[in-house]
Amino acid sequence: MDVDYRLAFDMAPVGLVLSRNRTMVDCNRHVCEMFGASREVLIGQSFQVLYPSADEYERLGAHMEPILNAKGHYADNRIMKRANGEVFWCHVSGRALNREDPHASGIWSFEDLSSQRPVKAELTGREREVAARLLEGLTSKEIGRALEISHRTVEIYRARLMRKYNASTAADLVHKLLAGD
């Protein structure tokens, strides 16, 4: 049986990107539709164009590297940015093809979560990072370790998120982040 891997890649029900050194070398149709950009525009671009800010791109890349190095794969939910500037929640998972040099080459999948989890509040980059970790169920101390900031700083960001989402408790905040309220 002849298998057309290119067709399978292009028609996959999730966004797929092949990367080298955090640059997109190929992507499928779903990625183009999700991010609102043509294949010609995305190929050769740094993943940074898909992030709300350069700082988030740098911090997340540094955070992912030791995990990719140890496990060979990585996954999380994060806020990404479409070509038109709209931000949205996205599930991202990937595999390093060489664990010793995890950013050298990899394959990444992207799933748009905006229908289940819309972004309704204007958040700073750090607030987005804290919100993503809260949704993973991490405590302030665990978030602080992951983001290399103090747990008290995490609590300040959590308080800001609670004000922005009009949440009365941490559980209420998580519920509102999940619902996009």
Image: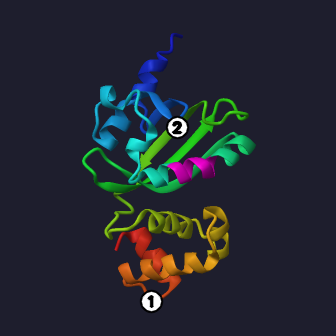
The residue at which mark 1 appears reads as 168
Please tell me whether residue 139 belongs to the stretch shown in magenta.
no
N-term-proximal mark, 1 vs 2 = 2
For the question of whether residue 101 can be seen, the reply is: yes
Q: Is residue 151 above or below residue 33?
A: below
Circles 1 and 2, Cβ within 8 Å, touching? The answer is: no
Q: Dot 1, crowdedness within 10 Å: few (<14), some or many (≥20)?
A: few
Residue 22 placed where, x, y %?
52, 36
For the residue marked with disc 1, what is the amino acid? Ser
Quadrant of residue 15 in the image? top left
Foreground pick, 57 / 36? 57
For the question of whether residue 165 can be seen, the reply is: no
**Extent of the magenta region:** 58-64
Task: Give the position of the C terminus as an image quadrant.
Answer: bottom left
Residue 76 placed where, x, y %?
55, 54
Residue at the image position 51 percent from the left and 47 percent from the top: 92
Q: Is residue 70 left or right of residue 43?
A: right
Q: Is residue 40 above or below residue 32?
A: above
Q: Is residue 173 left or right of residue 84?
A: right
Tag 2, which secondary structure? strand
Which residue is most to the top? 2
Task: Give the position of the N terminus as an image quadrant.
Answer: top right
Disc assigned to residue 52:
none
State whether the magenta stretch is mostly helix, strand or loop: helix
Foreground pick, 96 / 123? 123
Residue at the image position 44 percent from the left and 89 percent from the top: 168
Q: Dot 2, crowdedness within 10 Å: few (<14), some or many (≥20)?
A: many
Residue 53 placed where, x, y %?
40, 53
Which residue is most to the bottom? 168
Foreground pick, 111 / 108? 108
How far is the residue under mark 1 from the one under mark 2? 37 Å
The residue at which mark 2 appears reads as 108
